[in-house]
Image (cartoon, rainbow, N blue to C red):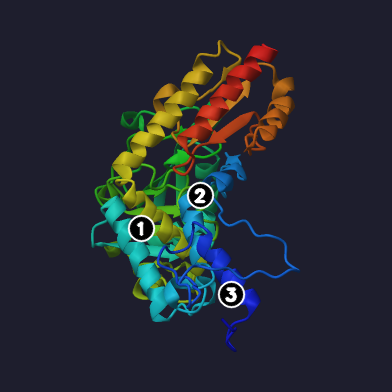
Amino acid sequence: MAATPSTTPHSLLLQKTLQNHVFLKPNSTTFTNQRSAKPFSISCSATTPIQDRLSFQSQSQDRVFNFAAGPAILPENVLLKAQAELYNWHGSGMSVMEMSHRGKDFRSIIEKAEADLRTLLNIPENYAVLFLQGGATTQFAAVPLNLCQRDDTVDYLVTGSWGDKAFKEAQKYCKPKVIWSGKSENYVRVPSFDGLEQRPNAKYLHICANETIYGVEFKDYPVPSNPNGVLVADMSSNFCSKPVDVTKFGLIYAGAQKNVGPSGVCIVIVRKDLLGNAQEVTPVMLDYKIHAENNSLYNTPPCFGIYMCGLVFEDLLKQGGLEEVEKKNKKKAAILYNAIDESKGFYRCPVEKSVRSLMNVPFTLEKSELEAEFLKEAAKEKMVQLKGHRSVGGMRASIYNAMPLAGVEKLVAFMKDFQARHA
């Protein structure tokens, strides 16, 4: 079979090899000897043998269990699908990274991502879904700029570093007040909502639903005392980890890089009647109304990041939705917290049990001088990014949706073995 002008022995070899890899479509074209109708391969004497098949098992063995807080672990099957589609997305002849954001191909990607997210969280039609840039930190400014005027009062409930940073940024654009802070106790709990001294005219009440650094998570949500006020939540580190009643909130925002995608995308879910009241000084790129009117395509969005988020949403739906995802997350967290609590003080989690995060598990060692050795030995066992945030020290295991049960089980087994050798 002679090579045609559009093919060479090298390109035929590449196509044959790629067809044997598990991540390509099963209906890819195969090459056969026309006389014998038997599959054949072409090889060059100058090339080294290429492994016929790359198994999921060998792929997994090459990867570590990544306990990073963000950017964080992504589902392996999502990465493999993205790998398969990277060069030529759905026969378009180009990668998602090369597409015009105004073309029909990318429009289909972002529209499906939004539709799947709406299904996952049961987002009503009177809420806009925005795919933005700048991370959740940019929303610390965008929220007050869009929801209130310079002299308006707003309340902040601070249960960790991120809530504190959001409050400090809001001071530039309105009149915020911290109505409760856990800083004096080193952020280990969520207050009783009954005792909160909310201001009657506060435009919104802001919370961080899950504090990544300290591992404190709201299990229920406060209600603004102002009947015209709204609840605003930074859900960056527990977004899509469990079902949430979106209608309890006026606005939800979340950086994607912890639970639903790579860094570079920030998702905002905002009630539509709150749009259109931005302060005059609001930069165009921070005006939610402009982004809503343009379906998140006012300027070039983070296209590949949105595509990856869409693949994650699709995967979460295939798992049975967020109810099933929450069950898995509770099981993983229980295994890890039980190991900490049953270690007789060798390991300790300072957070009150009732508000312990399902996503971020901070813990310390009884002998702090062993921390470096713990991290070193864990890394040798292909468990990485277990060091706590630089502001608090200790350890932190982030066990987001994509962390498999096997990863948590391996960590717990290692922790017990380490304790046996060093207690």
- Between circles 1 and 2, the one closer to the viewer is 2
- Nearer to me, 207 or 119: 119
Q: Is residue 202 above or below residue 352?
A: below
Q: Residues within 10 Å of mark 1 (few under 14, many from 20)?
A: many
Gap in angstroms between the C-alphas marked 2 and 3: 33 Å
The x and y percentages for residue 373 are 73, 26
Contact? badges 1 and 2 (CB < 8 Å): no
Looking at the image, which residue is at 69% across and 30% down? 375
First in sequence: mark 1 vs mark 2: 2
Q: In the displayed orientation, state which residue is furthest to the front.
A: 36
Gap in angstroms between the C-alphas marked 1 and 2: 22 Å
Residue occupied by mark 3: 12
Disc assigned to residue 269: 1
Identified by mark 2, the residue type is: Leu
Instruction: Report whether 32 appears left or right of 385.
Output: left
Gap in angstroms between the C-alphas marked 3 and 1: 48 Å
Element at label 2:
loop
